[in-house]
Image (cartoon, rainbow, N blue to C red):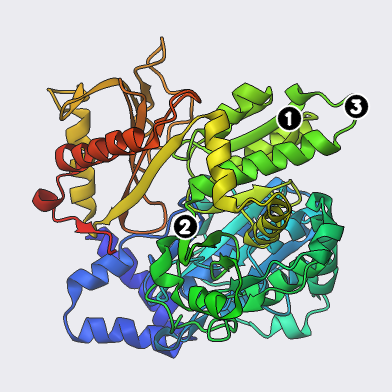
Amino acid sequence: MMCCMQLAWEIGISYLVDPKNQKTKEQIENLLQNGKHKELRDRLCCRLTFGTAGLRSAMGAGFCYINDLTVIQSTQGIYKYLERCFSDFKQRGFVVGYDTRGQVTSNCSSKKLAKLTAAVLLAKDVPVYFFSTYVPTPFVPYAVQQLKAVAGVMITASHNRKEDNGYKVYWENGAQIKSPHDKEIIKCIEECVEPWNGSWNENLVDTSPLRQDPLKKICDSYMEDLKKICYHRELNMQTNLKFVHTSFHGVGHDYVQWAFKAFGFQPPIPVPEQKDPDPDFSTVKCPNPEEGESVLELSLRLAEKENAKVVVATDPDADRLAVAEQQNGCWKVFTGNELAALFGWWMFSRWKENCSKDADVKNVYMLATTVSSKILRAIALKEGFNFEETLPGFKWIGSRVKDLLDNGKEVLFAFEESIGFMCGTSVLDKDGVSAAVVIAEMAAYLETKNLSLAQKLLEVYETYGYHISKTSYFLCYDPPTIKRIFERLRNFDGPQSYPKFCGDYSILHVRDITTGYDSSQPSKKSVLPVSKSSQMITFTFQNGCVATLRTSGTEPKIKYYAEMCALPEQSDRSVLEEERQKLVEALIENFLEPDKNGLIWRSA
C-alpha cells in the first residue's frame, strides 16, 4: 500500500505538476481512466536497471520505460555520483552522443533525450561535449578518452526493435560502466527522482557557453587513429574489389565512407533505400544484421547487380558488423565466431609481420566473452600469445583491456559472438566502423593470394582446429518462466544438484555464473565474477562440446550457444557438425523444453 501511495505522489510530481511531455502524460492518464491497473503497476512499480548495455527499454510513459523523465532522473543520479567521485568534474566535463531513433506516440527521440541529458549537467555548470549530429556509438567512448572527460552517455538501443531506446554510460577509462558504479548510480537515481530546476531546459545546448561541439575534432582524430591498423594502403588504393555497405537506416553511412577513404579505398557502394536514417527501419523486419540473409536482402541484390563480392552491414548505431561474401552465385553470411577467427588470424599475422625485433609475443593479448568461440584460445596456444575470457558484454572486455594496457600489455583484438569486434585499442568497445574497413583490407589482401574470406576461414580452422558453433535463441516474455527453467537445472536430480547428462550426452563440468558455482574448480567457485542479475549456466560435455544457456541483457530472449572444439588433426568437419547438431537438439529438448514452457522459436 505504501508503495502505491509513494508512486501516486511521484506520478503527481513528475507527470501532473510538471507535464512537460503531453504524450507520455496522456498515456498515464488513459491507463488511469480505463482502469488498466495491472499495466500501470507494470509501468510504475519498478525502475530501469543497468544490463549488459546500460539502460534499455521501450519508449513510453513509466519508470521502467525510456522517456524524458527517466532520462532526466538517470542523469541527475549520474551527476550526483560523479560529483562524489571526481573533484575536477566541472573542469573535465561530460560527453553526450545519440543515434537516430524516435517515436511519435511518446514524443521521444534520441536527440531530444540527449539534449535533456546535457541540460541536467549544463544547469549544474558542468561542461558538456554535445555532438551536433548523430554519431556511431564508438565515438562516445573514444571522445571520453580523447577529451579526458569524466564520463559519457550515448542515447541508443543499438539493433533493438524500433520501439526501444537506451542510455549507455561510459566511465573515464572509455569502457562501459560495470559494478560497483552501476549499482551506486542506481542508488543516486532513486535519491533524485524530482527534476531539478533547469533539467527540462533542452534549449541549454544551444545557449550555454559550457556546451562544446566535439564532432570535427573527434571525427578527424578517429579517422587518423584508424590508420594505425591499416597495413596495405597501396594495395587498397589499387584493388578492383568492390564492396557494398548498408547502414540499416542508422548512423553508419558517412562514417564508413570516411573510414574507407582513410584506408585508401574507393568508397563502398551504399544501399540507397537504407543509407539515410529512418527510425521506423522501414525496409527490414528487424534492424539487426545478425539475423542474416533475410535482413540483408537489399544489400545482397545490390551487390549482385554491381558485381561486388563483399557486403558489410553495420547495425543502426554502427557498433556491430555483419559480413557476407559471394561464392559461386550464392552468398555466405559469416557468423560472429567465424569473423572472429578471421580477425584473430589477421590481427596477429599483421602484428607478427610489422612488430619490432625485440617485441615479445608473451606480451600480446586477445580477449573474448565466455559464450563466444574458443578459436582465439586455439590460435593463442599455437602462436604463444595470451588469451583471456570475460563475462558476456563489452563492458567487461573494455575494462579488462584498459587494465592490460595500463600494465604495459599489447591487445590486438577482442570480440563477442554477437558480431561485436574491437580491432586495436583506440576504442575500448565494439566498433562496426573500424571492423568494416579492416575486413575490407583483409579481403583485398586475400584476393592477391587468390583466396576468398571463406577459403581463408577454412585454412584457419585446418591450422588451429575446427570450431563448429551454433548460436540462437528463444523469445520468452514471462520472467517467472525463465526463472523456473534455470532453477530446474540447478535442482535437476534433487535439491542443488545439476544434471549429469543431457539426453545421451555426459556432462563433465557445470559452471553457474548466477550463483558462482563451478564444478571444474577445486574450490567449486567460478573464476569469472558472479552476476546475480542474469541467468547463465555453462555445460562442458565429455565429447568436448561447450554449451551455455543465458538470458539476454537487452531483449526478452533465452540464448543458447554450443561449440565443438576440435584439434587440428580432427579434420572431418561433417562429423563434428553432426555431433554438435545432435547435442543442440538434446539441449533444447531436455533443458529448455520449449513446448512445455511456451517459448517462441527464433523465426527463420
Residue 357 numbered mark, or none: 3
Q: CA distance from mark 3 to mark 2?
A: 55 Å
Q: Are marks 3 and 2 in contact (CB under 8 Å)?
A: no
At horizontal 26% and vertical 22% (from top left) the residue drawn is 507
**In the depicted view, which residue is nearer to us: 73 or 602?**
602
Identify the image quadrant of the C terminus.
bottom left
Q: Position of residue 23 (x, y in %)?
A: 40, 88
Kind of residue at disc 3:
Lys
Q: Is residue 472 above or below residue 509?
A: below
**In the depicted view, which residue is nearer to us: 322 or 139?**
322
Left or right, 279 with reference to 588: right
Q: Position of residue 366 (x, y in %)?
A: 64, 35
Q: Secondary structure at mark 1?
A: strand
Residue 190 numbered mark, or none: 2
Q: CA distance from mark 1 to mark 3?
A: 14 Å
Quarter-wise, where is residue 414 in the image? top right
At horizontal 54% and vertical 61% (from top left) the residue drawn is 325
